[in-house]
Amino acid sequence: MFVKLWMQQDFISVDQDSSLAEAGAILDEHHFRHLPVVNADELVGIITQTDIQKALPSAIDSSLNSQDRILASQAKVSSFMTTTPVTANPMDPLEDIAILMRKFKIGAVPVIEDKKIVGIITESDIFKAFIEILGAGEEGARVEVQVGRDRSAIYTVIEICNQFDIELTAITVYRNFSPDQQLLTLRVSGEKLEQMVDALWKAGAKVNRIIMDPDDE
């Protein structure tokens, strides 16, 4: 899974000379929390809702007069943006960017190609990818299976699915389930589900549980 498959290409940005008031209005209107800051399509920084809130003491300091509030809101984005944000390439693996976002506690990463910004990837985009990879919302059943840690174990499961004409729409692997076993989560559909489960047991796999889609029960 690569960043380019999940990034938002239709993004909104601001110029480095934009005011904090302008950036804040865009964030409020579109319910964003992050805005790339660009100069001729080149990324020069990123500003967040938190940056703006910290830069505008008028939001929490009622002692400021109206003129001070106006002056604060007219301050330039360039004075408060992060000038060296974490960035991604469209061909970066999605999981690598998720690790960076967690490491640096950030909610969005601009995507750069040939020095130009071509998109942005956010926490929400990664959640959507995670949901689709797991096959959530798909018709069928969710089957959890314990198998050995050798490589042939996964191939055996796939062969059994094929044997009973079971459509395998998603598979995830938790390799560190135990010292000698890995946990597979299968999203499957087909008429011979019971026969497939029996075959898995006979092949030495342990079927922990089966969760049926409500429409299939």
Image (cartoon, rainbow, N blue to C red):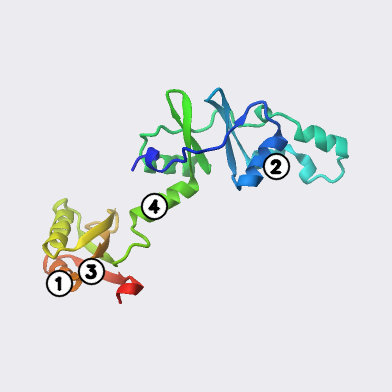
Closer to the eye: label 1 or 3: 1
Q: Which residue is labeled 1 in the image?
A: 195
Residue 182 appears anywhere in the view: no
Label 4 crowd bin: few (<14), some (14–19), many (20+), radius 10 Å? some
Closer to the eye: label 2 or 1: 1
Q: Residue at x 44, y 33 (%)?
A: 88
Closer to the eye: label 2 or 3: 2
Element type at mark 1? helix
Sequence-wise first label, 2 or 3: 2
Closer to the eye: label 4 or 3: 4
Q: Residue 60 carries which label?
A: none
Q: What residue type is labelled 4?
A: Phe
Q: Are marks 1 and 3 in contact (CB under 8 Å)?
A: no
Q: How far apart are marks 2 and 4 (CA)?
A: 31 Å
Residue at the extreme bottom of the image, as rendered: 217
The x, y position of residue 11, in whole percent, is 52, 38
The x, y position of residue 174, in whole percent, is 30, 55
Label 3 crowd bin: few (<14), some (14–19), many (20+), radius 10 Å? some
Q: What residue type is labelled 2?
A: Gln
Q: Which residue is labeled 2 in the image?
A: 53
Q: Which residue is labeled 3 in the image?
A: 207
Label 2 crowd bin: few (<14), some (14–19), many (20+), radius 10 Å? some
Left or right? Give the position of 113 relative to 202: right
Sequence-wise first label, 1 or 3: 1
Give above or below for 125 relative to 194: above
Q: Residue at x 62, y 28 (%)?
A: 15
Q: Distance between the residues labelled 2 and 1?
A: 59 Å
Q: Which mark is residue 130?
A: 4
Q: Which residue is drawn at 17% across and 57% down?
A: 158
Sequence-wise first label, 2 or 4: 2
Q: Do the residues labelled 2 and 4 touch (CB within 8 Å)?
A: no
Numbered marks: total = 4
